[in-house]
Amino acid sequence: MGQSSYEIVKTAIYQTAPERLPVRMGCFGCDDTMGIPFATGETRVDGVRVADEWGCAWEQTEMANMGQVTGHPITLEQVPDFVAPDYSDDWRYADAEAVLERAETAGKYTCVGIFFVLFERMHALVGFESLLMGLALEPDLCTLLADKIIDAQLVRVRNFQERFGTRIHAFSMTDDWGTQQAAFVSKNMWDEIFFPRYKRLFDAMHEGGQDVWVHSCGKVNEIVEGYIAAGVNVVNLQQPRALGIEEMGTRYRGRICFESLADIQMALPTDDEREIEADARALAKHWMSPEGGFILSDYGDGAAIGASPEAKRKMYAAFSRVSEDLYGKPLPTPQT
């Protein structure tokens, strides 16, 4: 009997020899993981987010994507009086049990998503420029804001743990940290202000028996070192060429599990099978090992990056060949 989806993901993360590459591509009906729902108090009009429960106003751009924050509810000077959402409300967890039961029946690895976990939430609340200025000139107010956000996230984490225990296998979160050239802040500032707060959150996740997954866009090569020290198990990086595939492999292969795909800027949008295959082979050479350390995942909004369904099919096929070469077993047959 082969490994379950849960076992394939877990052995990839801890690099103890999965039978194939783990995959998270729901667009093809192939996903070794299952997201566990958490209800938010955001406001939507015709399905489009216009406000979130933190008080941030959202607008949709001309590009079909998730939109962006255009209205910031507080200034840094108002941080002492700011009250974060209460994540202990029962209604937020009402749909989780049924999904967990489906996941367990299917042998899936379960994951709770946290959108805008810290840095992104900070600049959504006060504005990007204001936050960067504040980090340099008013660090006490910035750290107070960071602590309030982490305190709220800890309530969410502990509620999931108290209600569902180790049936929750991971928390997965987003915090974009970089431009195309470098991180938004120095590594020294990141270590001083953000590292201890991430570690407090990630330690709580590990104490409850969950793995820690973090997504970050941009050239975040130095930040990954901090993530490892803070306890991240899986880092989702969707621009491998911008990071430098060989450089990242030299520094981090075997120390963290990568979740990635063909580059969303320079490979997938080209629809060129040779470019896509080249990324798959380079990632296999530098980021993967026979013991694991890699998870193939989708970029959910293909239209936003100009990636056609056909480009995704080519990518899936390329990584299926990599899986067979490295582990002896291809990816599951696409269903759609």
Image: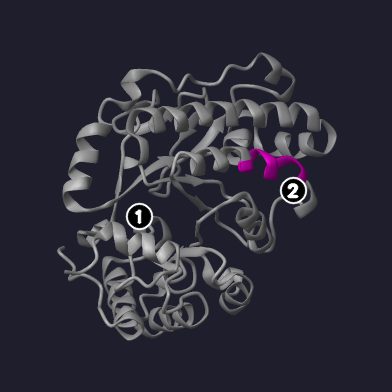
Q: Position of residue 63 (x, y in %)?
A: 42, 49
Q: How many marks?
A: 2
Our reading of the magenta stretch's main secondary structure is: helix
Please give the range of residues in magenta.
Answer: 192-199
Instruction: Give whichever of 51, 105 is nearer the camera.
Output: 105
User: In terms of image quadrants, where is residue 102?
Assistant: top left
Q: At 65% across and 64% down in the image, what residue appears? A: 221
Q: Residues within 10 Å of mark 1 (few under 14, many from 20)?
A: few
Q: Is residue 194 magenta?
A: yes
Q: Which residue is mark 1?
A: 300
For this orientation, the residue located farthest to the top is 81
SS for dot 2: helix
Q: Which mark is residue 191?
A: 2
Residue 25 appears in the picture as rendered:
no
Instruction: Give whichever of 69, 151 is nearer the camera.
Output: 151
The quadrant of the picture occupied by the C terminus is bottom left
Q: Position of residue 240 (x, y in %)?
A: 53, 70
Q: Residues within 10 Å of mark 2 (few under 14, many from 20)?
A: some
